[in-house]
Amino acid sequence: MPVKGKIIGFLIGLWILNIPGALLGLWIGHVYDQGLQLQRGGFGRWRAPTREEQALFLHTAFAVMGHIAKASGRVTEQQIQIATLFMDRMGLSGDLRREAQDSFRQGKEADYDLEGALGLFRRSCRGRPDLLRVFLDMQLQAAFANGALHSASRQRLLEVAELLGFSRWELEQLLAMTEAGFNFSHQGQQQRSYSSGSAQQTPPRDRLKDAYAILGVSADVSDSDVKKAYRKQMSQHHPDKLAAKGLPPEMMNMAKEKAQEIQQAWELIKQARGIR
């Protein structure tokens, strides 16, 4: 957010009218900075995101997904099915689905300009890091959808993360959370099968460790810290907040699924700790 106007207004006001002038100058500078933010555009809080910006989100998401899939040398049928699954989860059909398929194919091309595409996308998300996190989370889910991550894909994900402004440490943390989410969901399905008396002979592994990883904390943190982690994750992934920040409506189902996963992890931890 611009702060130059506030600083200049404060200093001029302080010089002319001492403390009262400084406060007046600070307010005038704040108004100036608001106007500057509006002029610059982007996913700002001063205007609603345009449909073109939302379309850019979807186009870049599927193009980068194709680019990461190609990193291991050849795009497999399974990777194509994963991209198709994401289109199904978003409810894409007709022209939107064809555009997503075209974007995926463009990303696979050898001359795809990853740096240019992510630079444009990052500028469109200026001031809204939660959207960048959702974008990266989508790429991680796609890369890890079969339960394993190819070394070449990991390297490409690191490149994507850095171009979006994330550190290697942040990427590793997000990878751990994505893997935990995959296991947590899979174990939940196993647990339901086990409880219903199906042919499964052994119960699924303990989900509690993955529940903590989904919230980004270890099992030895205090109740207060785990509550803070839960609230932070829900704040970052709340569908209504993401929609207000410019998340395309086609991605709302995925945002709701993520929020449900976080909620389920929290409920399991609460039960284990006896938190009310």
Image (cartoon, rainbow, N blue to C red):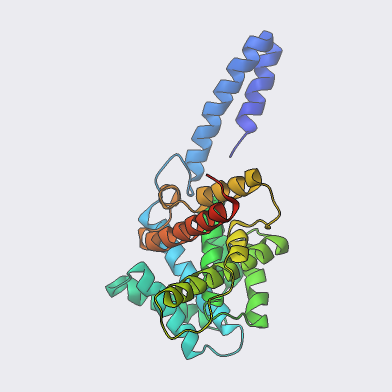
Depicted 114 relative to depicted 25: above or below:
below
Q: How many marks?
A: 0
Q: In the picture, residue 29 is in which quadrant?
A: top right
Answer with left or right where residue 85 lies relative to residue 150: left
Residue 133 against residue 67 in the figure, above or below: above
Estimate the x, y position of residue 95 in percent, counting from the top left: 29, 73
* Spot occupied by residue 82 in the image (x, y as percentages of width and height): 46, 80
Measured as percent of width and height from the top left, residue 253 is found at 38, 62
Of residues 58 and 199, the one nearer the viewer is: 199
Q: Looking at the figure, which quarter contains the N terminus?
A: top right
> Where does the image place residue 149, in percent across and percent down from the top left?
62, 80
Please tell me in which quadrant of the rendered image residue 154 appears. Answer: bottom right
Residue at 63% x, 83% y is 150
Observer able to see residue 207: yes
Q: Quadrant of residue 162?
A: bottom right
Do we see residue 112 in this rendering? Answer: no
Q: Is residue 129 above or below residue 179?
A: above
At a point 62% along the width and 62% down the height, the residue shown is: 213
Query: Foreground: 272 or 123?
Result: 272
Please indicate whether residue 75 sits to the left or right of residue 56 in the image: right
- Which of the two residues, 208 or 196, is positioned nearer the viewer here? 196
Which residue is located at x 60 percent, y 37 percent?
Answer: 2
Residue displayed at 53% across by 37% down = 36
